[in-house]
Image (cartoon, helix red, strand yellow):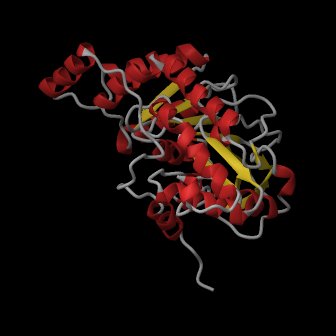
Amino acid sequence: MTKRTIFDRLGPLFARTDVRRTYRFSRPTLHFGASEYRAIREIVRSGWVSNGDHVRRLEQHFIDRFGVKHAIACSNCTQGLVIAVRAAGLAGARVALPAFTWPSTLYALLLNHCTPVWADIDPETWLIDLGSVRARYDAVLAVDTFGNEAAVRTRAPVIYDAAHGYALPRLGRRGLAEVVSLSFTKLPTAGEGGMILTNDSALAREATELRRLSARMLEMAGVIGLNSVAHYEETYLKKLQVTERYRKLLRAGFREQAVPRASNHSVFAIRLDTPAVRDRIHAALSDRGFETKVYYDPLAVGLPNTDYVYNRLLALPTYPQMMGKVRQICDIINRAARGRGVGDKRAR
């Protein structure tokens, strides 16, 4: 059997996204006003387009809000993970990570010539289960899956893929480093970007130099990020209202992610009873123009909990602009769960 590369794994994920869909899965919520447009015009006029005052102010926001010693802004979360692994001195190490994650987690290790040591997940929390690992490992790359706060107990060094981790209670206080995503799919967003958080000054110095060489954040991203964090609570509450409306209107049998510590509910994913029901609902919503996500496609095979969860999971759009469509989405889900297709006149 031919070994799958990281690029083979990425293909199906992007193939599932149809840009012609009427309602996308993700959409950034921005609150731009005259001051933001003035700032962007000034950036263009000045010619200082990266790692300037706006980026430094965004870094300071993370330092102040989360009480972390160092915050290093970078071009995206993937590059932030690559840098964090290298700056932590883990290049070439054997690193335990969950197979249930976005491919960037693995990509950061492969670019540092690390050997992935696959871990299964807890079937209820969907977080890494280090107890499932039988092979030797030198370090751990844990993931805040869908915004569910991970807390790994091990003597080995730990880096946290906190792509979905903004505003978690212990953010800024875990492991050697944490890396937050500010992509357009996240709340908050910088359009694109990432933030490395660490209390290790030596790691921060190395990460800052690596960032300078390969992953500087654009000043325009800094403007967008500052605007987004300023309106985070307002947008977050609206997002939670969308999620709560799903809970009230869904009649199909489903389970939500268990939260052992804290969650920011970055993604609202439901675990359906069977793979067939999940696939039927996914297809019905797609036919009606609603983009949903079937992820994360496992990065390794043979992990029972990972396979079980993935084969039953469906993530629904929760950005505030979807509030007026939740009832329609739930009607489609409820009917599809009962086996009534979108072509059934009674389902219209």
Where is residue 10 drawn, in percent x and y?
50, 63
Residue 255 percent location from the top left of the image: 77, 45
Q: Nearer the viewer, residue 286 or 77?
A: 286
Q: Which residue appears farthest toward the left when viewing the image?
A: 45
Q: Position of residue 326 (x, y in %)?
A: 55, 38
- Left or right side of 221 for 162: right
Please say if 341 is above or below 125. below
Image point 42% across, 21% down: which residue?
58
Q: Position of residue 178 (x, y in %)?
A: 61, 35
* Camera-nearest residue between 307 and 129: 307
Q: Residue furthest front?
A: 346
Picture layout, residue 113 above or below residue 332: below
Identity of the residue drawn at 43% across and 41% down = 76
Q: In which quadrant of the rendered view does residue 156 lie?
A: top right
Image position of 299 with respect to 194: above or below: below
Q: Quadrant of residue 247?
A: top right
Quadrant, the N terminus: bottom right
**Is any atom of residue 151 visible in this view?**
yes
Name which residue lies at 75% across and 45% down.
127
**Is 265 left, or right, of 7 in this rendering?**
right
336 to the left or right of 32:
right
Using the image as rendered, state which of residue 20 and residue 325 is in the foreground.
325
Q: Which residue is depicted at the point 41% across and 29% down? A: 29
